[in-house]
Amino acid sequence: MNNRNKSSRIAQGVCAMAMTVLLLSAVEGAWADEENLVAIENLSINDLMQIEVSSASRKSQTLSNTAAAAFVITQEDIRRSGATSIPEALRYVPGLEVAQGALRTWDITARGFNSEYANKLLVLIDGRAVYTPLYAGVIWELQDTMMEDIERIEVIRGPGAAMWGSNAVNGVINVITKKTKDTRGDLLVAGSGNQERGFAGFRHGGSFADSDGSYRVYGKGFSRDATVNAAGAQQDDAWRSGQMGFRMDHHVADGDGLTLQGDAYKMNIGVPLIDNAVFVSPYTNYIPNDASVHGGNLLTRWESTLPNGSEMSLQGYYDRAQIDALFLGEDTETYDLDFQHRLHPNAMNDLMWGANYRHIHFAAKNTPNMSFAPPSFGYQNVSAFAQDDIALVADRLRLTLGAKLEDSYFGGMQFQPNARLLWAPDNTNSVWLSASKASRTPSLVETKAAAIAESMTSPSAQTFGLPVQAVVSGNSNLKAETVTALEAGYRTQWNPRLSTDIATYSNHYQDRIEAAYVGGVATPVFVAASGAIPNYLSLPIAFRNAATTISVYGLEMSADWRALDWMRLEGAFTYAKMNAPSWDGINTDYARLIPRTQESLRCLMDLNEKTKLNLALRHVGTLDATTAGVPAYNAADANVAYTPRKGLDISLVGQNLSGSHVEFVNNAFGSRLPSLIQRSIYAKVSWSH
């Protein structure tokens, strides 16, 4: 057994044993002397179970009364983790696959189908969908804010399309920032390290004179060092970014409020040379360059309590993102208007309905590598939803029925229903069941793009000694993907020190959109004056709806144990199995997109009033792929924080302390060597007044 496999099995065994201890301790803890238990400095277990969650049903409800696989990352969790970005904060969420494919690329999804272009997860920031129509996913490097301004991150695993619409197929991530009344004063953050070369942020918040309102403004920036590939060669992918923004909250009258907020950003991202590639015209003299990215957004929201006691909200936002790179240029503008009305006709029913209108304008800078026809066009999506939360037996048994009807430019009319049943026999236990259907609409690339790979795979015996270039064509006749999901879960608070959460699911995907080889054989291509021997093979690829069904089954477990008054343990275990067609050597290799198991263990300690120590260990199972598998790996993180006086925090953070490793391979044709995610150590100082 090699060292990598040995260390992987040791880490897996440690995490499994720790998880077993957490769960079995429930039996012993059930008879603990509750009167003598003292909560750790922060939230108690009961407080955590009462945390508000709004992403599952578009209304505030406690975590214990949420009929979904939900997990909440608090601001305290973010601070203790040392995360400098939203993806890093998601690392230890049970059931979520978070892999860093390169310096700036994150591969994030729930319950399978992960990739750099993962398209089955809906992400919201303060109600604004951070969605790119280019590939129907999230460009994670564009999603940033002051980490200190985040109140919580809600993660809902499983379909949420009945409330949020298409693309909320495998889950919803909702980043909720603090209200401005909670961010008054000044905050200065700065730090540096071996990978985080330098970062800084500033925030100022205050109140309006003679007005029941408050505001904040912020600015931040960072510079991150280039990574190395699996061969140890440095890649030209250094990353620099700057962002600023504001938010204003104004309380108009009882129950009425107005919010206005916006962000603007600009960044330069290095584009590395592809390894072992054979370049063709016009890329023969290709030199790595910086991709220039800039954009911004503006959002306003009105919330009101009507005289009859019902509640309504009206939200609108504008979002623009511009990308200028050698292989792709795009300018995407999104206009979104969302209305929601909640009413209580009687003690039994909690009704909610709403409608949404979205207009997207896309303009491409066509290149020899990728082009769209026409290069500039606009389209719209219209949807409406309704939901009734029915109290069958007081608050102990609740049935939620909801559905969304959506007319999409790509994919046509979609009906996405959902049914959830929650039984809470007492204040410490809850069991839930759900059945739902969700859709994922085709993207611009899948329907309208014509792409030619800028490089070719290296010659091999299978390619008759010739390099191969992929030629990809869009398909305007694609149907929307669909998933039918069955879920069940059980939450319990065994005592004031221990709680557990278990969820299981069975997902079945139909009409999956895949890139597939079409035609009989690859076409030999002759360059002028090259003679009778072809220079390379042209491989035709097209998008299509697959005829086969893929099923994914899984189990997700988490536990939170206040072992001592000054120590908290969090453990998580995820198991997933995908039944997919065998890879045929050309078409999409679906089995590579999900690890069989993931385990994590976090230990949060308050050593004294001024010093906090946080240790974390996670193990990710093998991605068994024929094309580009990734071995199982371990990662250890640590954060020690010292507060010499009120308002001043000094932290030393270590990430991936167990050593460099590959987390994901983001190149379908295998010509780019995977990036090594390296050990990172940085120091951070935070001052507030």
Image (cartoon, rainbow, N blue to C red):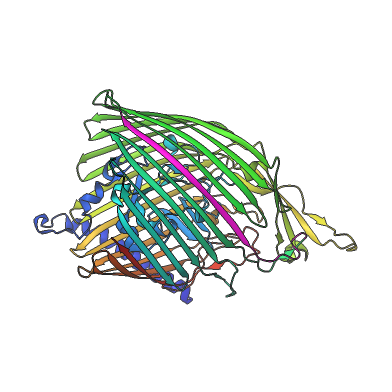
Q: Which residues are magenta?
A: 281-305
Query: Is most of the magenta stretch helix, strand or loop?
Result: strand
Q: Is residue 262 left or right of residue 391?
A: right
Q: Quadrant of residue 301?
A: top left
Per the image, is 253 magenta? no
Q: Position of residue 560 (x, y in %)?
A: 27, 57
Q: Position of residue 45 (x, y in %)?
A: 22, 53
Residue under the point 47% across and 39% down: 317
Residue under the point 59% across and 33% down: 409
Residue under the point 29% across and 56% down: 559
The answer to whether residue 352 is above or below residue 369 is above
Q: Is residue 164 left or right of residue 324?
A: left
**604 or 555, which is in the foreground?**
604
Q: Is residue 554 left or right of residue 406?
A: left
In the rendered image, is residue 130 in sight? no
Q: Quadrant of residue 627?
A: bottom right
Q: Is residue 272 left or right of residue 593?
A: right
Q: Position of residue 162 (x, y in %)?
A: 43, 35
